[in-house]
Amino acid sequence: MSYKKNDKVVLKLGGHLLSNATGNFNIEYLKKLTPIIEYLKKSVEKLIIVVGGGQIARQYINTAYFFSRNNSSLDLLGIKVSHLNALLLSIITNNPPTSIPENLQDVINQTSYRNIIITGGFQPGQSTTTVSALIAEAISADLLIIATDVDGIYEKDPKKYPDAKLLTETTIDTLKKIFDKSIIEAGEYKLLDPYTLKILERSKIKTIIINGKNPGNIIKAIKGEKIGTLIKT
């Protein structure tokens, strides 16, 4: 299935895609990403992009951790960085906002006059993946794309187990078994956390997990090509 102009798409971009392990922005990646976003602007009616904090947020959190172990405060640092990432992406894609949405109501309000919205985190204890799922549910999105640094969902961690098998399709029940024991700590979120799974289960939004290191994979997901992991709800 390919998507039409009147469709609504939510794209979650992991912050680690925008910057490298040292915290420097990946300029070459951003150069490849911007025409993809331009294509999406012309291809769908509404596009909401949720950006994570990535390695830059991790550096802030690690520094603050020497002085404070308050996870809510540390999470606020990560949220502010995700908003900066969202503002950066807005500027380089020629979509400067009047303000970066800070909560779900802000996003809903902006959908009435903007066809592309870029945002970050909302509140402590909540991953930006959860934010993307909440937004997808609130606007009755046709598709939620979660772009990360792996090819999709594996039966076990592919970074630890080279023999891990990619799941081209999976169910919420299977994902619960894989991710339900995730611990929510500041700046440390698994690919899918329990909050996100609950939202996907109740909203039944079509969701695809893809490797976003090649931005062209986003287009493949939009066009309905077989890529990554499809979550059957």
Image (cartoon, helix red, strand yellow):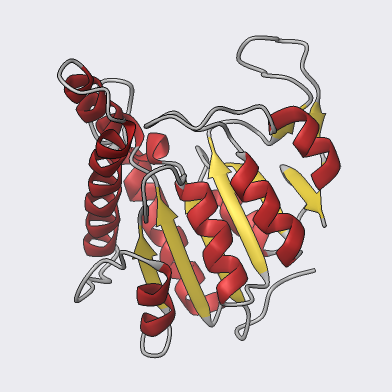
Tell me if 131 is positioned left or right of 174 in this view. left
| Residue situated furthest bottom in the rendering | 112
Q: Quadrant of residue 91?
A: bottom left
Query: From where the camera sits, is residue 205 visible?
Result: no
Where is residue 81? Give x, y as percent: 24, 44
* Residue drawn at point x = 52 percent, y = 48 percent: 129
Q: Quadrant of residue 140?
A: bottom right
Given residues 86 and 189, the one toward you in this image is 189
Say if 222 sits above or below 187 in the image.
Answer: below
Tell me if 43 is positioned left or right of 70 in this view. right
Tell me if 215 is positioned left or right of 63 in this view. right
Query: From where the camera sits, is residue 159 visible?
Result: yes
| Residue situated furthest left in the rendering | 67
Quadrant in which the C terminus appears: bottom right
Where is residue 113? Give x, y as percent: 36, 89
Given residues 45 and 77, the one toward you in this image is 77
Where is residue 10? Give x, y as percent: 54, 64
Tell me if 44 is positioned left or right of 96 in this view. right
Where is residue 215? Give x, y as percent: 50, 48
* Residue drawn at point x = 78 percent, y = 50 percent: 231
Quadrant in which the N terminus appears: bottom right
* Residue drawn at point x = 60 percent, y = 83 percent: 5
